[in-house]
Image (cartoon, rainbow, N blue to C red):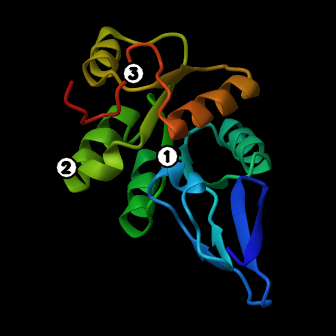
Amino acid sequence: WPGYAWVARGALICHDLQGDDPQVIAPSDPLALFLEVPPGHVIAPKAILVVDDDATFASVVEDVLAAEGYQVTTATSGLAALDLVRDRRFDLILIDVRMPELDGPGFFKELQSRDPEHARRVMFMTGAAVGPDVVEFLFSLRAPYLRKPLPMNELCAAVKRFFVGQSFPGFRRPGDRS
């Protein structure tokens, strides 16, 4: 191109030499960073929704992921999260399994009925003690999940693996047929 590019805070920024202001484009494919991007455009950072009824934990996760360059939104219930996904697309939804009103599995089932493609972007978080119904649910999806409490460097590594499609043990995105 007749310009230059650099990476800053999780986004590839391209600028042409004619001085036009950069514009934001959001890639649907994480490998888009390696594709040709028109000069003057910016690939937007990934948008992550963190859903946890523990507002303090959600805030810590938000701060850590925002520092990694992600755009982070939080919700303290599955119902609030459903309202958010009605109006906005997220690249990843990190959701607690156990919450009052609407838990993680209930949220997932509702999202899957409304928008199966969006449901493929869910990663669950759970405390150490889960019942057999939750274990069966997670196993049936073979979805990625994280055990809380977890070191924040492990959270960041799991998010990066999710976006580049690297495998977790037994992982497949919900809805994959294999």
| Residue on which the image places disc 3 | 171
The amino acid beneath tag 2 is Ser
- The amino acid on which the numbered mark 1 sits, given as a three-letter code, is Leu
Q: Quadrant of the C terminus?
A: top left
What is the quadrant of residue 80 in the picture? Answer: bottom left
Question: The N terminus lies in which quarter of the figure?
Answer: bottom right
Q: Secondary structure at mark 3?
A: loop
Q: Nearer the viewer, residue 31 or 1?
A: 1
**In front: label 1 or label 2:** 1
Q: Is residue 144 above or below residue 112?
A: above
Asked whether, in this view, residue 137 is left or right of residue 52, the answer is left
Question: Which residue is identified by label 2?
Answer: 113
Give the mark, 2 or 3, whose residue is nearer the N terminus: 2
Q: Amino acid at mark 3?
A: Phe
Task: Give residue 94's position: percent from left, percent from top.
Answer: 52, 39
Give above or below for 148 relative to 155: above
SS state under label 1: strand
